[in-house]
Image: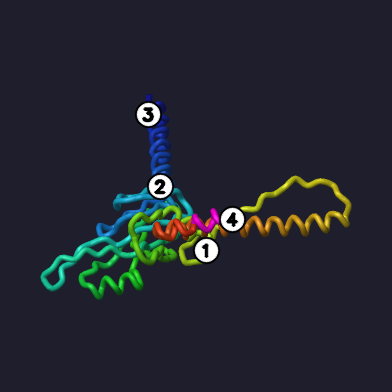
Amino acid sequence: MKRYGLVLSSALSSALLLVTTSALAEVTLTMPSNSELVLVNGVDANGREKLSLNNGLNQIAFRYLGRYQQQGSQNQFQSDVIVIKFDESDAQLYLSMPRVRSNSAANKFNQSPEVTLEDQNSNAVAFELGMLIKKGLQLGRDYEVEMAAYNVTDQKASLNIKPATISTPQTAIPVATAVSVSAATATKQSKKSEQINVGQMLDFWYQQADEETRKAFKKRIEDK
């Protein structure tokens, strides 16, 4: 009976260890009350709930959202979209931003956002910070499209995604022919990569344009 109790105790301890390890095998990110989510790893998000993320590289887009009183009037401040990128595993992370309490503080924050990222032990966590900015009218923005375009650039907190090249099966061919075919293939692949970049940027700028500019763009294509 005593031996059975020891076996049962060992089994329970192993199960508890497995559950604990499983629970820690992820990254959690707690957002502050003065924030609003925009994208989580390139996918639309909202609110400011606690996030459960996979271990490794993560990219979060959000903005400061809050109110302050100045000269007897209530003001709401919504910052430009902030992008952060970090690479962590099995950690509980906490993001924080200072309170904005005046027009000048709001302008200063938009120019240079103050963002802090710490782990469960209050240790600073390394991250990159960038801005997803669109000039002009902000209504009807497609943040997923904007982020996809942003992530093929070399801007801060970008994922620096490079267009994929398509490989073709190799066949035995004469050496002289191989040289010319290799050069031609390289040229085609280069042009294909360029076209992918062009297509992505066209999609991006089309989304940024107003209705009149879109109509003019369509007319130019139809007239070709």
Alpha carbon of mark 2 to alpha carbon of mark 4: how far?
Answer: 39 Å
Which amino acid does the dot numbered 4 rest on?
Ile
Left or right: 164, with 172 as reference point: left
Alpha carbon of mark 3 to alpha carbon of mark 4: how far?
Answer: 65 Å
Tell me the element at label 2. Answer: helix
Which one is earlier in the sequence, the residue at label 1 or at label 4?
1
Are the residues tagged 1 and 3 within 8 Å (C-beta)? no
Which amino acid does the dot numbered 1 rest on?
Thr
Which one is earlier in the sequence, the residue at label 2 or at label 4?
2
Is residue 101 something that shows in the picture?
yes
Crowding around mark 1 (Cα neighbors within 10 Å: few <14, some 14 to 19, many 20+) is some
Are the residues tagged 3 and 2 within 8 Å (C-beta)? no
Which amino acid does the dot numbered 2 rest on?
Leu
Tell me the element at label 3. Answer: helix
Are the residues tagged 1 and 2 within 8 Å (C-beta)? no
Q: Which residues are magenta?
A: 218-224
Residue beneath label 1, please? Answer: 153
Q: Which mark is residue 196?
A: 4
